[in-house]
Image (tube, grey):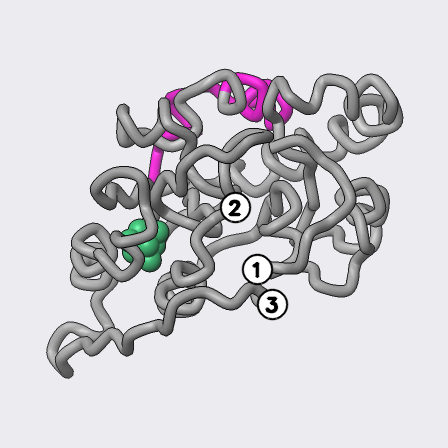
Amino acid sequence: MPMKIRTPSLRKQTGASIPTIRLNSSTKDSLEALLREVRACKICSASLPMDPRPVLQCHGSARILIVGQAPGRKVHESGIPFQDASGERLRSWLGVTSEIFYDERRVAILPMGFCFPGTGVSGDLPPRPECAPAWRNKLLKHLKSVQLTLVIGQFAHDYHLPNAGSTVTEVVQSWRMHLPSVIPLPHPSPRNNRWLARNPWFEAELLPVLRKRVALSLSDA
Ligand code: SF4
């Protein structure tokens, strides 16, 4: 998703009413049971361009949490998060192989919306606003081993770093304030090549620290 002036945050969007999700008492503490419920979710199916296909990676042992936006069409088709050009760039930013990236015991991937939201006139639509209120806190409660959270793009910034700045550039520029446990990033999409060219400090200053924090977080995983 290209970085421009922010649109109203995900939390300010008014979407359809959000049904209560009920977990019975025998399963409410189980991540496995919760993930089964997420994968069967149809809360906003009427607003999606295709049948829901939540794409996420989550295990209670994960040391790194990656918070993205929402799957694009290619990821929706594969069912594998960041299996696209954005993912290739993200893995090179982190300095990790695909094997490490897709090891759920080391890396959790929870986008702000789990299903492909469709395409608008200037790219993919924002994550569905129903998704984070329905699932996010319930899943995050199970990620007790996370040492580093990578917050990627406008909608993730709005949710996880609400006071860090009013544009993606401002939020990413504030990266030193959030160390050592959180690092904000721009979206690694090829659509952001111009942003990367205009902000050379990102590759020169932030990426070396990011790679060190990733390696440290994974060192005994
Ligand atoms: S985007 Fe989220 S809330 Fe909507 S159907 Fe998919 S998992 Fe459910």
**Residue 117 seen in render:** yes
The secondary structure making up most of the magenta span is: helix
Query: Residue 10's spot in the image, x, y percent?
Result: 57, 60
Q: Residues within 10 Å of mark 3 (few under 14, many from 20)?
A: few
Please state which amino acid type lies under the numbered disc 3: Lys
- State the quadrant of the N terminus: top right
Q: Residues within 10 Å of mark 2 (few under 14, many from 20)?
A: many
Q: CA distance from mark 1 to mark 3?
A: 5 Å
Q: Residues within 10 Å of mark 1 (few under 14, many from 20)?
A: many
Query: Residue 189's spot in the image, x, y percent?
Result: 59, 24
- State the quadrant of the C terminus: top left
The answer to if 58 sits in the magenta stretch is no
Left or right: 124 as drawn, with respect to 39: right
Q: Residue at x 25, y 41 (%)?
A: 53
Comes first in the chain, label 1 or label 2: 1
Query: Residue 7's spot in the image, x, y percent?
Result: 68, 52
Q: Residue furthest bottom?
A: 25
SS state under label 1: helix
Label 1 with label 3: CB-CB less than 8 Å: yes
**Residue 160 seen in render:** no
SS state under label 3: helix
SS state under label 2: loop
**Residue 121 versus residue 64: which sits nearer the camera?**
121
| Ligand 1 image-quadrant field | bottom left
* Label 1 residue near ligand 1, CB within 8 Å: no
- Label 2 sits on residue: 126
Could you say which disc has been placed on residue 109 in the image?
none
- Label 3 sits on residue: 12
- Label 1 sits on residue: 10
Magenta residues span 88-104
Comes first in the chain, label 3 or label 2: 3
Please state which amino acid type lies under the numbered disc 2: Pro
